[in-house]
Image (cartoon, rainbow, N blue to C red):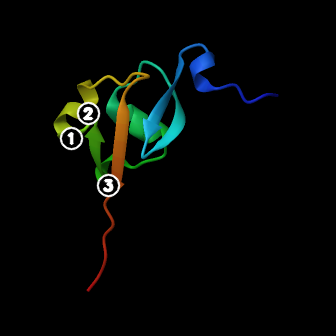
């Protein structure tokens, strides 16, 4: 079995996430991309192509090959 880049798989693409290239299925909205990449959407803030994207837009925001994501994980702590 070979590792084929997602952009060469049918329906796959490669995204730039936090400075790294990551494979992801094509045709997903941002909230589904986050889950695909292993994030818990309720615990992150997303900068999408240089703009902090409000959470209510994630389900309708399509993601494509040229998009750049910066994902910041919210970390809780005690006092």
Is there CB contact under 8 Å for labels 2 and 1? yes
* Whether residue 66 is situated above or below residue 18 in the rendered picture: above
Q: Quadrant of the N terminus?
A: top right
* Residue under pointer 3: 43
Which badge, 2 or 3, comes first in the chain's sequence? 3
Q: Residue at x 44, y 22 (%)?
A: 65
* Residue under pointer 1: 55
Spatial separation of the CA atoms under disc 2 and disc 1: 5 Å
Spatial separation of the CA atoms under disc 3 and disc 1: 11 Å
* Whether residue 16 is situated above or below residue 10 in the rendered picture: below
* Quarter of the rendering containing residue 70: top left
* Residue under pointer 2: 58
Residue 74, percent across and down? 31, 61
Residue 28, percent across and down? 40, 24
Which badge, 3 or 1, comes first in the chain's sequence? 3
Judging depth in this view, the residue of 50 and 27 nearest the camera is: 50
């Amino acid at each position: 079995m070979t590792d084929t880049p997602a952009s060469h798989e049918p329906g796959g693409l490669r995204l730039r996430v936090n400075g790294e290239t990551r494979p992801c299925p094509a045709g997903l909205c941002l909230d589904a991309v986050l889950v695909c990449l292993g994030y818990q959407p309720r615990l992150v803030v997303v900068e999408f192509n240089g703009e902090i994207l409000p959470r209510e837009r994630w389900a309708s925001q399509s993601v494509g090959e040229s998009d750049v994501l910066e994902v910041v994980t919210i970390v809780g702590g005690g006092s």
